[in-house]
Structures are given as structure tokens and as C-alpha cells.
Image (spheres, rainbow, N blue to C red):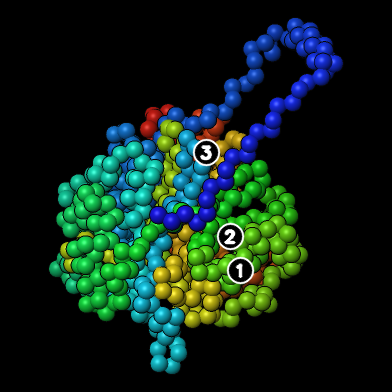
Amino acid sequence: MHRARPGLAGKPRAAARQVPRTAARGGCRVKRLLLILLLLVPAAWAEGPARPAAAAPGRSAIASANAHATDAGMEVLARGGNAFDAAIAVSATLGLVEPESSGLGGGGFLLLHVAKDGRDVFVDARERAPLAATRDMFLDGNGEADRRRSVDGALAAAIPGLPAALEHLARHYGRLPLSQSLAPAIRLAREGWRFGPKNAAMLAWRKEALAGDPGAAALFLPDGRVPEVGTLMRNEDYARTLELIAREGAAGFYRGPFARRLVAGVRKAGGIWSERDLAEYRVVEREPLRLHHRGYEIVTAPPPSSGGVALATILNILSGYDYAALPPAERAHLLTEAMRRAYRDRALYLGDPDFVQAPVAMLTSPDYAAGLRAGIHPRRATPSALLPGVDAAPARPDTSHFSIMDAEGNLVAVTQTVNLPFGNALVVPGTGFLLNNEMDDFSVKPGVPNAFGLVGDDANAIAPGKRPLSSMTPTFLRGDDRVAVLGSPGGSRIITTVLLAALGLMDGQDAQAVAAAPRFHHQYLPDRIQAESGALPAEAVAALEAMGHTVEVTDRSWGNLQVVAWDRGSGELQTGTDPRWQGVGKGAATAEEASIYR
């Protein structure tokens, strides 16, 4: 494990001072006066002040994108595990039943709050470029980007981080051994689960790529066809891989016979992995970003996530307006202009902090936001082409997120991914999982968009051992009255999905309302507002277009938001799981009186 920076030592208390005798006599007079006042207090006051807000919820809750994963986490909590043990169970189960979105062949970001220490930590389990990677490895002979090679096949795969993250959680934060936390996923892999509508929809979209790899075809296309919804699916190889990790930890995955099998399979398929790539992989603990807005503290992801920096830019810009009181069109206009500028900066400045000195302090500064705000016309859109920046696809519901809060107040927000649905569509035989295609998240060439339409520059260029920039934005929201854990998949739309959810929670919406609310999005390029049906009233769309915005309202939806929220005063514990995939996700809490949404 690497740590990006050491923790801050506590400040020593000031030395005691001698109190002058005259001051002591004055203190006695004050005490007598206070006693008299207390005797005069009305009887109703004698009952004492209102009960203070609880320091911990006293029960636990999980919201995830799949009911099997939520159930696995609840099982581990019932066996005496904490939120971190439950996170291992949820993560491993999602990799099994939602292989289109995440798994052992991918990576993720884990945002943790350790209640006993009052400490927040960001665990970076993002994939790394192989050491043989080069800046122009996806350019053809004419210097043009060959997008197919950065998406499909072995060359598209970066070195996975999720197996290392699972051991890291167990070793440093959990209470149970890996064998217990991984047990539900191992059992389910052998007993089987039912192929669902989300699995089928995503597999149909990637069928051609999966059919081209024998390992993937054998696992996901029995008899050469997409399985019917309801088909019982088993994965013995996945169970054996989890048992290896449970028995030997991350070393069993990244070194020895299993690592050699992975490397041989990748290289046979045309990839550039080496045993050194796997042996040198480590998760990195980084200091989370902390923002303040409307009386809430927002704890969120630092680089190599672009999410936290973008949230800071947007919220700092919005802090100069009474936007919550504005009509829908004016509020959407200001949000759009803030999004536009945040995504422009994402393209210009952000990358792996171990390789790039990104100006995070500047980008998250209220003074910088004030300068950006000065360029926003209150009634006119700013064309992206007029903003200095990068010269210049619709997102699919890949990636996965889950949120956990346990009875002690530990918090976990995890966003994990293999990038595009079913990753690079390659399975090394005998391993049971797909590899990622995260190499596409690098800037293959300045100004050339990736699969999500995001452009980038040299800060996110390919380099050996470098981690690609990500939009994953696991987030905590903390206020005097409310604590929430949230995050979502959605490619380039993750940031704005989390933004709108956070604003909804600040406005007092409950967890399920926030998860279900229609969304809109702007990402600098392409220069248009994309809106789910119902996100903006018809009159607001007309007003935005009159301001010069291009608005594209679509019946398609995006994201898969998972929220846990705790009301510190009433003790109510809510879970909100995105209804865009009906009957797939699940929120659950450990007490009957808690609010449970499914």
C-alpha cells in the first residue's frame, strides 16, 4: 500500500494559565447569578434541552445495483462484519452477477469513513497502464486514433486493481477474514443466479465482440446465443478465483501461477502485460477532497478521479447565486454553464496525480470559481467553442456503484468498473472474469473523444504505469441534520448525476426520490444539454433554447444511482436505489422501522 500523504498530527493543547484571585472572586459572583436565574426558569425548561442528534445510526443499510449483492452484504453484516466487510461481499457479488459493469478484471474507487477515528480515506484501486504502454499505441500509420483497438481485445486492458482493493479492505478496515466476506459470492457462483434483463440488454449490445473471444463466448454465449432472461447461470472458475484470493490474499492473484496464466492469456491474444506489471500493482490511499456548500460538507474523490474537482468547480460557481429559488429554466441555465466550465477544465488539466501536477487547489478555489462565474451571462448560453480549451457517444449504463452505512457509523461508497459494458470482451480461460478496456479512458490523442464523448489533453496521455483519468465520483454528504452516501455509474454523466443527487438531498428530498429523479447533463463537448424525459418542463426547454442552448430530450436514461441517507435527528435510515432497471437493484436496512426502498 502506498499513501499519498501522511495524516495530520493533532494540535497540542495550550498550556494552563494561572487565574488571578480577583478574577476568581468575579467568577463566584457569576455562578451565584446563574444559580438565581436557573431557579427562575419555567418548569417546562427544567426538563433540559432537546435530545442531541445521535452519533451513529444504530443500524445498517445497503443500496446496490443488484439484489444478490445487497443480500450478500447484509449476510456478512449479520455474521458480525462491519461496513468494510460488507463492501467486500457486495463488490465480489456484483462482479459475478453484473459482469457487464465491474469485476475482478477491473478497478474502482473506494471512499471510506472510519467511525472510530472520525477519518475519511480514499482508496484508489484504479487500473494502471502496462509498463510496455506507449503514448501513441492506439494511433494508426496516418497518426489517426484507432478506437477499436482501445476498446476491444487484449491491448485495451490495463492492469486490474479490484482484487488488491478487496484484500486492502479486509486487512486494514474489516473485522472478518476474506474467506467469510467472500463466501456469499463463492456460494452464488456455484449454486447459480438468474440471468436478468440488464445482463441481456448489455450482452446483446456487445455480442459480436464477446463472440470473437473463445473464453468470453464460452462463459456468456452458451450455444452461441444470448441467454434468455431467467436462465440459471453458474461460474465455477469465478468461485475458484475468489477462493484463491481468500486463501492467499492479493498475492495469489498478482503473483505465482495465476498471474502467469493471466499474462500468458493476454499476450496470446495480442496484449502487452508482463508478470512485473501484476507484481508491482498496489492500491494507493489518498486524501479525499472536501467541499462546503449550503451548510453541508461534501467528501468526494480526488484525482485520478475528475469527479470531485468538477463538483467543487460547479458548486463554487453556484454559490454566487440564489439558484435554489430560481425558476426551472434559469436554474438549469446556471447549472449548465457551471457544468460546461468544469468539464472544460477536466479536459485541460486533470490526470494521474502521480504523473501530473494538476492545479487542484486552483480548480477548487472559490476565487477561481468567481472568475468563471463572471463570464456567465444570466440570460445567454456561452458556446463551448468560445471557451479556450481542447479542440475537438452516448454513455451506456456500465460501471456499478454501491453505498453502505453500518450501525457504528462507518460509511462506504464504492464505484467499480470494467469501463464499457463487458470490458474488452476477453476472458482468460480458467479465470471466470472479463478484463477491462480502461486504456480507452486515456487521451489517445489530444482532442479525440473517448467512448463517452469526453475529450482530453496531455495531462491524461498514456504513459507506462499511469492510471487513466476517471469520472467515478463516490461521495459523502454530511450536515447537522443528515448524512448520505451516494454514487452512480454512467461514464461521463457520473459527475452530473452525483451533483443533481447531492442538490436534491440538500433540498430535502428523500433517498428514493433523489435516485428516481430525471437528469440532465452538459459536458463541454458536444455542446448540448442532454435531458432525460421529464427532467426539464417543456416551457423550460423552450426558454433554454431561446437563450442559445441546444437541448436534446431523450427517452433513453442513464446512471444507476445508489443512496443511503440517515436523518440524525429522527434516526430514520433511508435507502434509494435507481428504478431505471426495475427489479434489479435493491436497498435494505437491518431494522424493520427503517425506510426500505426496492
Q: Name the residue under label 2.
A: 309
Task: Give the residue displayed 63% in from the left and 39% down from the top.
Answer: 11
Residue 563 in view (yes/no): no
Q: Mark 3 points at which residue?
A: 118
Q: Position of residue 537 (x, y in %)?
A: 60, 58
Q: Nearer the viewer, mark 3 or mark 2?
A: 3
Disc 1 is placed on an element classified as helix
Quarter of the image where the N terminus is located: bottom left
Pointer 1 residue: 345
Q: In which quarter of the image is residue 227?
A: bottom left
Which residue is depicted at the point 19% across and 63% down? 257
Distance, label 3 to label 1, CA atoms, is 32 Å
Toward which corner of the image does residue 462 lie, by quadrant? bottom left
Taking the image as shown, residue 386 lies to the left or right of residue 61, namely right
Circles 3 and 1: CB atoms closer than 8 Å: no
Query: Residue drawn at (59%, 57%), measured in percent from left and top?
Result: 311
